[in-house]
Image (cartoon, helix red, strand yellow):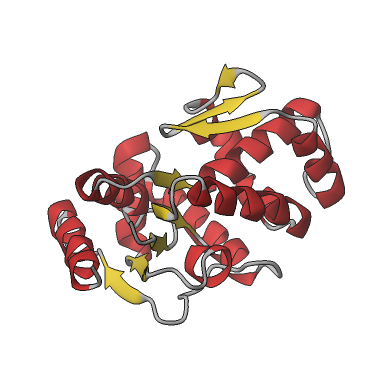
């Protein structure tokens, strides 16, 4: 069976996670959420009480940790932390951890191995998939949406004031797009899909059409 890697990038609040999971389900492909790796690295560093600004210290904390990703669940030292890594304590500082070159190198190699062991067939989501992790991906997609739309979506999920969420989104966008290592960007050759005024089903169908056209 030929390899088939679908790289899906984009900022938070664009529907990237829900769309990529549904696309993977319908296409019968494994799904890899690379952002979960940087979230679990953040949690490992927080638990180890290391300086999050110290890339070497964070990478060392990750090295000392046992991290597993399977069926969408993230396991840290035997504990299922899938829900904990989505909490505010991690979310508020994950961009700082994700900016460290040492940490990204650890996980890029692991993410490539994860896909390789599944026959080179997977839907992979993140912020540097089509540009760094799998620059030769068969299909590259960049999901985007207006910042106010993304803020409204997240506020509806969390109950936070929309203006606070919008400020946090602007902060994270800036950090992710300006970091020195693997910045958030539209990968070369990617199809950009603006989800601002699209329904979930419409986005999923558009991605499936791209897969069908490249099969």
Q: Where is residue 92 in the image (x, y as percent from the top left)?
A: 59, 43
The residue located at (60%, 33%) in the rendering is 89
Total numbered badges shown on the rendered structure: 0
| Foreground of the two, 92 or 177 | 177
Q: Position of residue 24 (x, y in %)?
A: 29, 48
The residue located at (25%, 43%) in the rendering is 25
- Of all residues, the one furthest to the bottom in this rendering is 189
- Of all residues, the one furthest to the front in this rendering is 1
| Foreground of the two, 1 or 13 | 1
| Image quadrant assignment for residue 196 | bottom left
- Note whether 14 is above or below 84 in the view shown: below
Position of 160 with respect to 50 (left or right) is left
| Foreground of the two, 91 or 180 | 180
Position of 110 with respect to 189 (left or right) is right
| Image quadrant assignment for residue 142 | bottom left
Position of 139 with respect to 131 (left or right) is left
Which quadrant, please, contains the C terminus? bottom left
Q: Position of residue 105 (x, y in %)?
A: 71, 56
The residue located at (57%, 26%) in the rendering is 75
The answer to whether residue 87 is seen in the rendering is: no
| Foreground of the two, 93 or 214 | 214
- Note whether 189 is above or below 30 in the view shown: below
- Of all residues, the one furthest to the top in this rendering is 78
């Amino acid at each position: 069976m030929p390899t088939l890697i679908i790289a899906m990038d984009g900022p938070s609040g664009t529907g990237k996670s829900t769309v990529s999971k549904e696309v993977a389900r319908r296409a019968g492909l494994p799904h890899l959420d690379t952002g979960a790796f940087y979230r679990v690295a953040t949690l490992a560093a927080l638990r180890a009480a290391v300086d999050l600004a110290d890339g070497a210290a964070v990478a060392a904390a990750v090295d000392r940790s046992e991290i597993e990703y399977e069926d969408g669940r993230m396991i840290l030292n035997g504990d299922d932390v899938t829900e904990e890594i989505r909490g505010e304590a991690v979310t508020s500082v994950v961009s700082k951890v994700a900016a460290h070159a040492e940490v990204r190198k650890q996980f890029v190699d692991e993410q490539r191995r994860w896909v390789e062991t599944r026959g080179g067939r997977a839907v992979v989501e993140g912020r540097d998939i089509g540009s760094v992790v799998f620059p030769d991906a068969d299909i590259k997609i960049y999901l985007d949406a207006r910042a106010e739309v993304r803020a409204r979506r997240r506020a509806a999920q969390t109950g936070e004031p929309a203006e606070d969420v919008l400020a946090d989104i602007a902060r994270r966008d800036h950090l992710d797009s300006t970091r020195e290592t693997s910045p958030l960007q539209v990968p070369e050759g990617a199809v950009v899909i603006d989800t601002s005024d699209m329904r979930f089903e419409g986005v999923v169908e558009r991605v499936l059409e791209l897969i069908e056209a490249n099969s």
